[in-house]
Amino acid sequence: METLKIIKIGGKIINDTVALQQFIEDLSKLKGLKILVHGGGNLASETSKQLGIKIEKVDGRRLTDQKTLDVVTMVYAGKLNKTIVAALQAKGCNSLGLTGADGNLIQSYKRPVTSIDYGFVGDIIQVNTSLIEILLKEEIVPVFCALTHDKQGQLLNTNADTIASELAVALASSFSVELYYCFEKKGVLSDMTNDNSVIETLDLEAYHTLFQQGKIADGMLPKLDNCFNALNNKVFKVCIGNPKMIVDSNSIYTTLQL
Amino acid sequence: METLKIIKIGGKIINDTVALQQFIEDLSKLKGLKILVHGGGNLASETSKQLGIKIEKVDGRRLTDQKTLDVVTMVYAGKLNKTIVAALQAKGCNSLGLTGADGNLIQSYKRPVTSIDYGFVGDIIQVNTSLIEILLKEEIVPVFCALTHDKQGQLLNTNADTIASELAVALASSFSVELYYCFEKKGVLSDMTNDNSVIETLDLEAYHTLFQQGKIADGMLPKLDNCFNALNNKVFKVCIGNPKMIVDSNSIYTTLQL
């Protein structure tokens, strides 16, 4: 099967103009089929503040009321997504920006209200791969932002790590999928205070041990769950590290294993 | 040749929730190949005001500085485009939102500075039709907002009427293209004070006469130029009127002729 690289970049890279430009240059040079998924970074929060919209979070997770959904739709699908697409085009990399509503590519349902009401947040039901495969065949790089829809007219704020993982799983029957989670660190660290303590290979057992020892930071937990979900569903390779890993085979990063 | 309907809706319909919902229902029922192009309406101006960004206009045309470009990118490509796409999906109409940067579909250049500096405003150089034809073949409705790019990384604010006209011209060699400019009036009026004075057939000569008599309103002039540009370049049919014209063959609207 042909290799497909799915690359997710996090918010901190998007907020750093120099790092983003370098990433875009690296991505445009990367040979073969690829998909980009990007997070939102703090531009949504900044825009909310400028518009006088209160930002509410529970356990570090943003609650998405109607006004916040409007802001994330403007920032994720508008400003960030189209800026990335235009920058890739400038490097000769033909790309196309998408939400899950476009082409009905990613359908989700609004997260049910329990003790917490997350608001307009979506959990993914289904990825429709045929149009994605058509775009890839046309040598177009699909660029997904963190929005899906419920096919009843409602856009839903959706975790970008999960979008990347679910895309990888859905496409794993047609491609040998490699999933790269890029962020500002070099990988999963055995010592959160030491940026050079990268665990180069992390399997499920070691993950559980680290977790029980309290050595995995909060934000890393859902990311690792997405990683193992992908590996459990026929995704060939899953890595976490600095964006340089996608072009520099000598760089140090974390490869996940079951 | 197969018929392709290109429908442009203006800002006032987009700002009217009831009218927009009715239009989306009508469009979703319209059989055959179709493309939607939408304007921005006053949401960009409102958002600019909320963000404390000054709106500057010369002769009724918005000057697009960097901050204004950010706002129109957020509003046109984000909020408006994705809301329309999600609403069409809810009606079972598979659609996909686009700027000219996506898939490098519409390339433009930044309007040269003369006595007026319009800022980040694009004049179209080229429409790349192959991906549009692929989407149409997949029964997907492309939904364009009023943004293009210069292929050097710069997004450019671009008149939606002109995007519709240039798409129509570019696709006229592959399809029998019908171009519908929908707005809040019933068509071109012979008497601007009388909404029922619709000119049902307007040819170039009659247009020039009305223009010399001062009977064509300012905003209508560039729209009519776009209409005649399309007719001069093998577009089969060009109409101006209320959105109802796309589904109601008995409704009264203006058909342009050379």
Image: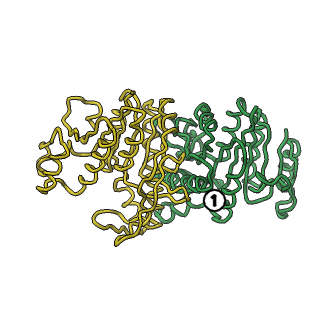
Chain colours: A yellow, B green
Figure check: A95 above or below A72: above
Q: Measuring 53% from the left and 44% from the top, which residue is drawn there?
A: B156
Q: Position of residue B41 (x, y in %)?
A: 62, 58
Q: Is residue B116 visible?
A: no
Q: Residue at x 72, y 39 (%)?
A: B4
Is residue B20 placed above or below A247 in the rendered structure? below
Left or right of A234? Residue A249 is left
Quarter of the rendering occupied by the N terminus of chain B: top right
Task: From the top left corner, tell me how far across and down residue A63 is, in percent.
Answer: 38, 66
Label 1: how many Cα within 10 Å (few below 14, some 14–19, many 20+): many
Q: Amino acid at mark 1?
A: Ile
The answer to which quarter of the image holds residue A245 is top left
In this rendering, does residue B238 appear at all?
Answer: yes
Residue at (38%, 37%) from the top-left corner?
A172
Direction from residue A248 to residue A110 in the image, left or right: right
Query: Please, is residue B171 above or below residue B68 in the view?
Result: above
Which residue corresponds to mark 1? Answer: B14
